[in-house]
Image (tube, grey):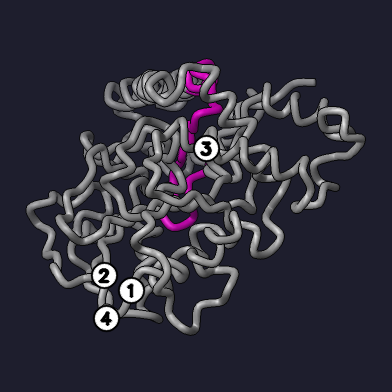
Amino acid sequence: MTRVFNFSAGPAALPESVLRTAADEMLDWHGSGMSVMEMSHRGKEFIAIHAHAEQMLRELLAIPANYKVLFMQGGAIGENAIVPMNLLRGKASADYIDTGEWSKKSIKEAKKYAKVNVAASSAEQGYTCVPPRASWTLDPEAAYVHICSNETIGGVEYHWTPDTGAVPLVADMSSDILSRPIEVSKYGLIYGGAQKNIGPAGLTIVIVRDDLIGQALPITPSAFDYKQQADNDSMLNTPPTYAIYIAGLVFDWIKARGGLDAMATHNRAKAAVLYDYLDKSAFYSSPVKREDRSLMNVPFKLKDEALDEPFLKGAQARGMVQLKGHRSVGGMRASIYNAMPIEGVQSLVAYMKEFEAKHG
């Protein structure tokens, strides 16, 4: 069996050792005689799996005791509605920072539930940077301030944590959570889909401070009420059991590799290989401002768009897939999440050099 280097933005590559463990345990998890997929979410076997996954996530991120960890469904798109439903808490408005396509989706959805103040935007810069904190026009009466910490499509990432004073900071971390250490206490709420750095599609992680829950809008469905989910250990309804199991295996894998400090070193080294080459080449270009470049998603363009298809076909022939950029921006995109080995990025750069020498 030959595995490809999978540069997909999500669902994305998983660690091979995790997949092998899951394969070994597919028919019989730890002598239970059952697959995890077959287990009751109320049974002792799955409750142990669930508890382990939460414990490991808390350990990796050093999550304070006054934060709930919720395993939910609906993805980041779902959270775009679920966040205002839960966090308005009697207030009329929320501040949003617009840094790209995913920020725009969050803003559009939040407008169904609240007055949205776009406190800063990089639209005029083509979404190639994070607006400087000094340019933000925040409302001290806002219910919360929302950011997308890493724009998967545009390749723009916050490498700093915004200070929003007494107003809770909310972050969509779908595509950079667990890629580096973060100080959870600086956020009121963190959420993200699992299908990039954590596990399969279908699981959404929510980390929320205790004092922010319990005042959901009356229209909030019970399954989307953070307080009700917290009171029921994320099992008010049947949770995505198999995805939680895989997430727990990924958390174990990260810990075994040295935790988030080691993960950050690994990710910086991978990104440097690709960005260093892009900066030296006149054939390829990187549109993002250097200090805001994502370590997870690297968009780049060829000098001549007519070469895009030959480039992609050549990459696939060499075992490198899912390099086509998002349809809204075109070009190429290499998503190099935690599970991507540095050898994958080195192989990509070697191919890019070969392609440039032939077509440049």
189 up-or-down from 139: above or below: above
Q: CA distance from mark 2 to mark 3?
A: 29 Å
Name the amino acid, label 4: Ala
Name the front one of labels 1 and 3.
Answer: 1
198 in the magenta segment: no
Quadrant of the image containing the N terminus: top right
According to the image, label 3 marks what residue?
Answer: 197
Q: Residues within 10 Å of mark 2 (few under 14, many from 20)?
A: many
Q: CA distance from mark 1 to mark 3?
A: 29 Å
Residue lying at 85% horizontally and 39% vertically, measured from the top left: 35
According to the image, label 2 marks what residue?
Answer: 143
Magenta stretch, residue numbers? 324-348
Viewer-proximal residue among 207 and 120: 207
Q: Secondary structure at mark 4?
A: loop
Q: Are marks 1 and 4 in contact (CB under 8 Å)?
A: yes
Q: Is residue 41 left or right of residue 15?
A: right
